Image (cartoon, grey):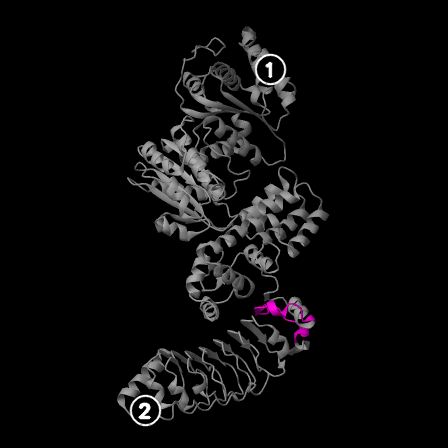
């Protein structure tokens, strides 16, 4: 076998077997840098070739290795301290440069823990290596070969490349090299992420979905909240899989593009150009575009990504009857849209936030880069990532803001985060909020109610409150869930990402939107105190509910009057806790739908008459009895649980629409009046732990609507006479056990 030289004959048009050939000194970098580089190239769908010169036998480069070099499209040379001491590496380098010059192929030099100047001018370890080559028997008789190595080394070292410093992370260099290779081997590939933390495990999961379908066109939906990384994930999936299709197209940011003049037309044009690889086709209107897509693409097996789809129209104008085994990947904030375009549940992938470990890693990459990581800043990093809650967009913005900044700037930034959410993040999240208006403006109000008051509350309880004012509360919560604005936890609590919750509360303070929500919802004690003490803006207030985790002695010092509440004509939700209200209740709470009040009085005021009230909660109240003399036609739920002093219930003739009555743990309640039997809508009665209750009205069993009676342990002194009634009572008592 002959030694390689500039005269080596090359095939006129060799087949391309490998995308990238890695040349490296195994003892220096195989188990560290080069292995990581190879893995990154492989994960991104390239076909890398990596051979270890240390494992070869003989003195001369093999024909199979020459073939691999010639059939590679690009080359990465990892120069390390001992690279020049290997004549195999140097022979590879000569052949690589020869192929690059002859067939115009890309060479990327990486200077790993070695200065490019040292390589270029063969100093230090490189000078020593060449002196040894000249000294060793055999090489001295082929000085031309050594000189060729020197010339080649200098020429390659002069090329633009990457320098990996000692004690610095090499991940950034690896990512940049991979991206450069991807652009070279396939211009259709896309820039993905500077730091792809946590990305590739997710890519593998979606790739499995792509490969699990046979015969038909596969539609895969990636959905999640704004900033969670749906587009980044779709790009990585696209890069990895585009080679498996005859043609591909990534249509980015469809939501924004479609809103511009001729936006849909430009998307159709891009689709035709990318799939057919022709710029000589012009589409004059979107209707002709639909027909052209059908006619020209239907026989081609394609991979198409529709990024940031927010409604059906672009899908209808861009997706035709494609060839079997084609794939369409959709990214969206709205899972409901996946129902509309019939993405099967098994092909839906919710893009979740990063884990704590992934969050810290991504933040550190952006905040430190390849720089040293001082211990004090690492400790601050742990605190800062808590504000991001695993959202990649937030981690990137936070980290980039702190790159190369001193500790004082980090502490200032942390303080700012606690007071004001980042505008760039909020604007991204606002997209989902704005989209709700297109479906139903009421959804925006429901979202804001939940963000301000009902996060970490049981879904069933929230539905009861919402449905006092809105219709279809459960259905609307489901829509918000599909927009990825909230989630339902395993214990059936409503949950919301902290940044989404802050966005909602910021909207209500008129910080992030034209939405006129200022002063309509009050949850912060200082805001409530300011509004009530200054009497400013009372007319606009719709809801006052203190945060559950907020407690201050100053609350008890606040003087509340009915006159204040009379000015709140729009007030619909109110939680007073244990505060008292002075004054006449006449013409007060006229629009109120839900009231939670641990009433400190012995009697409810006789003029208490909120005629639109649907849900009245008086838990742990001090009341003994009722003095109401006005019919509350709209009241459906009454909860006076844990009211130890309560001895009598209201006259149920005044509550004709009551559906739920909760009297649990009213220790001194002795009787249920016969008037309860006229409640034709009563479905649920809870008298658990009412230890003093002496008897149940016999007519209770005649209420056909009563579905559940919770009365486990109740001692009933009077029983119904008929066997049929006794059986019904037993069934109801059992249902509450």
3D distance between C-alphas at marks 1 and 2: 109 Å
Q: Where does the C terminus fall, quadrant-wise?
A: bottom left
Residue 294 on the magenta span: no
Circle 1: element type: helix
Q: Is 557 positioned to the left or the right of 196 in the image? A: right
x and y, in percent, of residue 662 in the image = 45, 80
Disc on res. 720: 2
Quarter-of-image position of residue 492: bottom left
Circle 2: element type: loop
Span of residues in magenta: 534-555
Establish if 420 lies above or below 678.
above
In the image as oriented, which residue stretches furthest toward the right? 408
Q: Is 63 positioned to the left or the right of 139 in the image? A: left
Q: Name the residue under label 1.
A: 130
Q: Mark 1: few, some, or many residues within 10 Å (few <14, many ≥20)?
A: many
Q: Residue at x 45, y 83 (%)?
A: 655
Residue 536 on the magenta span: yes
In the image as oriented, which residue stretches furthest toward the top? 141
Quarter-of-image position of residue 509: bottom right
Task: Let me know if residue 462 appears in the view.
Answer: yes
**Front-most of 602 and 382?**
602
Q: Mark 2: few, some, or many residues within 10 Å (few <14, many ≥20)?
A: some
Q: Residue at x 42, y 31 (%)?
A: 274
**Front-most of 594 and 393?**
594
Task: Let me know if residue 50 appears in the view.
Answer: no
Establish if 351 lies above or below 159.
below
Quarter-of-image position of residue 498: bottom right
């Amino acid at each position: 076998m002959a030694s390689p030289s500039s005269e080596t004959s090359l095939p006129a048009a060799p087949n391309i077997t490998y995308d990238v050939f890695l040349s490296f000194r195994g003892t220096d970098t195989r188990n560290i840098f080069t292995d990581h580089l190879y893995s990154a190239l492989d994960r991104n769908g390239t076909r890398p070739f990596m051979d270890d010169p240390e494992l070869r036998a003989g003195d001369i480069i093999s024909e199979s290795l020459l073939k691999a070099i010639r059939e590679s499209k690009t080359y990465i040379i990892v120069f390390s301290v001992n690279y020049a001491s290997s004549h195999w590496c140097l022979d590879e380098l000569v052949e690589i440069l020869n192929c690059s010059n002859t067939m115009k192929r890309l060479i990327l030099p990486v200077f790993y823990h070695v200065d490019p100047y040292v390589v270029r001018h063969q100093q230090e370890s490189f000078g020593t290596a060449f002196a040894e080559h000249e000294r060793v028997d055999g090489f001295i008789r082929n000085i031309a070969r050594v000189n060729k190595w020197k010339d080649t080394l200098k020429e390659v070292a002069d090329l633009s490349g990457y320098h990996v410093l000692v004690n610095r992370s090499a991940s950034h260099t690896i990512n940049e090299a991979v991206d450069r290779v991807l652009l070279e081997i396939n211009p259709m590939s896309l820039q993905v992420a500077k730091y792809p933390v946590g990305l590739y495990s997710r890519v593998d999961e979606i790739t499995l979905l792509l490969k699990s379908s046979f015969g038909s066109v596969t539609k895969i939906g990636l959905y999640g909240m704004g900033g969670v990384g749906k587009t980044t994930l779709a790009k990585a999936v696209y890069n990895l899989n585009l080679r498996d299709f005859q043609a591909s197209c990534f249509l980015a940011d469809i939501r924004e593009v479609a809103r511009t003049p001729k936006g849909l037309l430009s998307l159709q044009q891009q689709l035709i150009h990318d799939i057919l690889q022709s710029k000589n086709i012009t589409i004059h209107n979107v209707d002709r575009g639909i027909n052209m897509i059908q006619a020209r693409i239907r026989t081609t097996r394609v991979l198409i990504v529709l990024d940031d789809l927010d409604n059906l129209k672009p899908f209808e104008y861009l997706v035709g009857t494609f060839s079997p085994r084609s794939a369409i990947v959709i990214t969206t904030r709205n899972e409901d849209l996946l129902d509309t375009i019939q993405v099967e549940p098994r092909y839906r992938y919710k893009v979740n936030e990063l884990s704590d470990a992934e969050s810290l890693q991504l933040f550190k990459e952006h905040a430190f880069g390849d720089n040293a990581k001082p211990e004090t800043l690492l400790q601050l990093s742990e605190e800062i990532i808590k504000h991001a809650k695993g959202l990649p967009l937030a981690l990137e913005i936070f980290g980039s803001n702190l790159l190369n900044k001193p500790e004082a700037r980090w502490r200032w930034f942390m303080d700012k985060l606690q007071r004001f959410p980042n505008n760039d993040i909020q604007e991204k999240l606002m997209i989902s909020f704005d989209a709700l208006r297109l479906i139903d403006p009421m959804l925006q109000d429901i979202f804001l109610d939940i963000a301000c008051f009902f996060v970490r509350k049981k879904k069933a309880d929230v539905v009861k409150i919402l449905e006092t004012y809105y219709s279809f509360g459960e259905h609307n919560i489901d829509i918000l869930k599909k927009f990825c604005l909230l989630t339902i936890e395993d214990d059936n609590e409503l949950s919301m990402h902290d940044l989404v919750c802050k966005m909602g509360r910021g909207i209500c303070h008129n910080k992030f939107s034209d939405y006129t929500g200022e002063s309509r919802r009050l949850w912060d004690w200082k805001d409530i105190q300011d509004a009530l003490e200054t009497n400013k803006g009372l007319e606009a207030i719709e809801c006052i509910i203190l945060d559950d985790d907020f407690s201050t002695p100053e609350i008890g010092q606040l003087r509340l009057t009915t006159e204040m509440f009379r000015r709140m004509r729009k007030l619909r939700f109110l939680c007073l806790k244990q505060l008292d209200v002075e004054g006449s209740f006449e013409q007060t709470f006229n629009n109120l739908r839900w009231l939670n009040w641990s009433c400190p009085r012995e009697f409810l005021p006789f003029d208490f008459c909120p005629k639109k009230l649907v849900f009245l909660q008086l838990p742990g109240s001090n009341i003994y009895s009722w003095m109401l003399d006005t019919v509350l036609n709209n009241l459906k739920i009454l909860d006076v649980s844990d009211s130890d002093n309560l001895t009598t219930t209201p006259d149920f003739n005044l509550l004709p629409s009551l559906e739920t009555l909760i009297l649990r743990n009213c220790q001194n309640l002795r009787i249920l009046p016969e008037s309860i039997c006229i409640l034709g809508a009563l479905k649920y009665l809870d008298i658990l732990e009412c230890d003093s209750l002496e008897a149940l009205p016999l007519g209770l069993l005649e209420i056909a609507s009563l579905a559940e009676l919770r009365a486990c342990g109740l001692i009933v002194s009077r029983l119904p006479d008929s066997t049929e009634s006794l059986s019904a009572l037993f069934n109801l008592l059992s249902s509450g056990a």
